[in-house]
Image: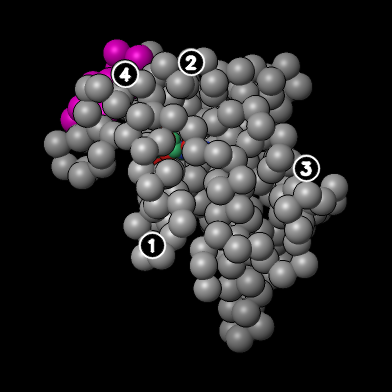
Amino acid sequence: MPAVEAPSGSSPSKSTPTFSPQDVTVLFVLGGPGAGKGTQCANLVRDHGFTHLSAGDLLRAEQDRPGSQFGDLIRNCIRNGEIVPMEVTVRLLENAMDEAITRRQSNTNNNNSSSGDRKSRFLIDGFPRKMDQALRFEEAVCPARLVLFYDCPEAEMERRLLERGKTSGRADDNADSIRKRFRTFVDTSMPVVEYYEAQGRAVRVDATPGPDAVYEDTRAKLASRLGEDF
Ligand code: C5P
Ligand code: MG
């Protein structure tokens, strides 16, 4: 089945979200490239049982999927640090959420395990990077509970990305792409952070220290904001 295909029962322009916040908790995770979003998400998965969906990882998988009609489009956007048209990314995320929820339900049924007692909780990493993605996702897929924003100076992010670039194999961890990604972040993604901050839905974490200190701060802030949902 193509990865970019609507889950059953959904249509591209609907006014009711596919998932209800009563059943599903969504946290968006934002921050500039190299801020440490993926590292912190892995910690939260390990200790708090979230399902981690990285928009960038889903786009790279779709780019490499044989027969994808979006491969070249995604490849060009990623190399140039540009935002992929939101229809593609929102659909990939919706499908991945649908699969994770289905998998969880069938595990619960098969093992009689207690995971069904809790809501499905998702960390949606690197999304929304642009206002149109934010509005479409919350309208059509699921309203987000919070936005976790990792705030880091560019010089530190650049240092981390160049270090990562030695081994990541990523086409965009080079000085030229990094410059373009920073520009897109400031021009296009920061307005999304500001939109959520103005609504009181953002949690800002200083991402300059090392990963352990950032994680401690993340946990303290999420515990106070999410209460028993954390
Ligand atoms: O989050 P990550 O750094 O892995 O994203 C890599 C690239 O994927 C971005 O620079 C952008 O080109 C694309 N992307 C996007 N929309 C998103 C997330 C990533 O277009 N929401
Ligand atoms: Mg990442």
Q: CA distance from mark 1 to mark 4?
A: 28 Å
Residue at disc 1, secondary structure: loop
Residue nearest the observer in this picture, 102 or 18: 18
Q: Of the residues under marks 3 and 1, which one precedes in the sequence?
A: 1
Circle nearer the viewer, 1 or 4: 1
Instruction: From the viewer's perspective, tell me whether residue 126 is left or right of residue 145.
Output: left
Q: Kindly identify the amino acid type of the residue bearing the numbered disc 2.
A: Val
Q: Residue at x 38, y 24 (%)?
A: 181
Q: Of the residues under marks 2 and 3, which one precedes in the sequence?
A: 3
Q: CA distance from mark 2 to mark 3?
A: 25 Å
- The residue carrying pointer 1 sits among few (fewer than 14), some (14 to 19) or many (20 or more) residues within 10 Å by Cα, namely some
Q: Which mark is residue 139?
A: 3
For disc 2, the marked residue is 186
- The residue carrying pointer 2 sits among few (fewer than 14), some (14 to 19) or many (20 or more) residues within 10 Å by Cα, namely few
Q: Are marks 2 and 1 in contact (CB under 8 Å)?
A: no
Residue at disc 3, secondary structure: helix
Q: Kindly identify the amino acid type of the residue bearing the numbered disc 4.
A: Arg
Q: Are marks 4 and 3 in contact (CB under 8 Å)?
A: no
Q: Which mark is residue 65?
A: 1
For disc 4, the marked residue is 179
- Res. 118 in view: yes
Q: Which mark is residue 154?
A: none
